[in-house]
Image (tube, rainbow, N blue to C red):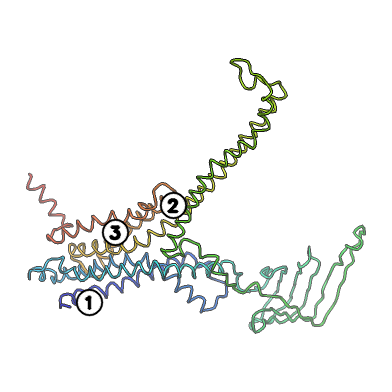
Amino acid sequence: MKTLDRFTLRSYILPFLLTFFIAVFVLFMQYLWKWVDELVGKGLEWKVIIQLFFYISLSLVPLALPLAILLSSLMSFGNLAEHYELAALKASGMSLQRVMAPLVFFTFGISLLAFYFSDSVLPYANLKMGRMMFDIHNQKPALSIKPQVFYNGIDNYSIRVETKGQDGKSIQQVLIYDHTEDGNNRVIAADSGVMEMTADKRYLILDLKDGSSYEEISKEKDPSSRSIPFLRNKFKQQTVRFDLSSFKRTNTNEDLFRENHQMLKSSQLRTMLDSFRIQKKRLQSDFGKTLADAYLRNSDHFLTAASRKTAPKDSTFLSMLNKPDRHMVIESALGLVRTIKGQVQAREGELHNNSNTSTLFEIELHKKFALAFSCLVMFFVGAPLGAIIRKGGLGMPVVVSVIFFVLYWVIAISTEKMAKEGVLAPIPGVWIAPVLLFPLGIFLTIKATSDSVLFDLDSYLSVFKRKK
């Protein structure tokens, strides 16, 4: 490897790694801010939280990688131009394309890795993250009994304590409503007690002291009786056990999520698309047969009414029938129309669902390839743009790269949404954004090669001055 290649690679790799991790961190914080309500108060173990954060970070790589390439290429070439290193290389007879050559190969390798990541690693990360978020969403908040507030988190029970000791265990003025049977037939009241969990956190144990329990006896034996037997029992000490198994986080079977389009590899997506095409052809071919069968089944019973009639010349079908038969034929015809309409709507719904689901899978398939192409496009936009603006660091490059990336992402999100809604086909819906920026990259490369002052306002004003 030549000295120039090592020099350009060193000036590019460090900004790339720095901007990549910064982009992932910023996007991660935005994601965390959105879903923080789902995570807080669930009593999650730190291992579960670390695993979830890791999978979330992996899922953000397709969004952070193009931004990192754009920003790092703009920073590195901006630094070379700002310190006149790029000018010195050009003065020695080297073109901008020669300086960019090792970085082009490096970015091409990153693009291949991006495709492998989106095809193999990302579906696995989405599967794990989707399953964990589903379990966390369905998990109850951690047990938290606050003073002077009825706590209803435990199934079929409502618990209220007046005060809690500083140790978090001792409680006073305890009131428990038992709803395990229909209604509110049992109440426990105690002056004090101790609240503890078992070692495996499976049960909550309340050791109550100096209290009473009140219970209504069921009227099932004598429903006509107006009196309701009432049982009161005083106690010096009583232990109440609550099952907390519903608070544990369940591990949902991952097979329930494997057929989601975001959790499949490209080969699996192609297999699913083939099955959708076969299903669509079958639905379309069966559609005419279904209508014909419906017509034959529903028309035989009223056509026989006219088979014995001899129709006069220029007469209509209904004129051949007497009034009762005519009414029967009309009702049968309406029934036939309703049946055919219902079957048409059912088939239409099946075809619509098939088309929508197939679109999602096709979009996901092309997004894997579009990610790799977007990485190359962002490099060819950022590198010549950095050579033109001649500013390094995190100032001007950040502003310019964010503008271009927001433009790219707004177009990508808009066209993808239009493709999902059926306004655009899946292929243009995914590829419009990188394809639109690709000519811009070529244009900027040409301008940077010719040392064009693209952002110099005086150069544009000079054209009008010469005309005057």
Identify the secondary structure beneath mark 2.
Answer: helix
Q: Residue at x 7, y 45 (%)?
A: 467
Residue shown at 59% from the left, 67% from the top: 138
Give the left or right position of residue 40, taking residue 215 as reference: left
Q: Position of residue 406 (x, y in %)?
A: 33, 58
Q: Quadrant of residue 302?
A: top right
Image spot of residue 296 (x, y percent): 62, 36
Q: CA distance from mark 2 to mark 1?
A: 42 Å
- As displayed, is residue 302 above or below residue 429? above
Q: Position of residue 315 (x, y in %)?
A: 61, 17
Secondary structure type for disc 3? helix
The residue tagged 1 is 10
Vertical relation: 15 (above or below) 358: below
Q: Amino acid at mark 2?
A: Lys
Sequence-earlier tag: 2 or 1: 1
| Residues marked 1 and 3 touching at CB (< 8 Å) | no
Q: Amino acid at mark 1?
A: Arg
Amino acid tagged 3: Phe
User: Which residue occupies the foreground of this view, 12 or 423?
Assistant: 423
Q: Nearer the viewer, residue 439 or 308?
A: 308
* Pointer 2 or 3: first along the chain: 3
Q: Kindly report the distance in space between the C-alpha atoms of the residues bearing marks 1 and 3.
A: 25 Å
Residue under circle 2? Answer: 420
Which element carries disc 1, helix, strand or loop?
helix
Q: Which residue is mark 3?
A: 404
Disc number at residue 446?
A: none
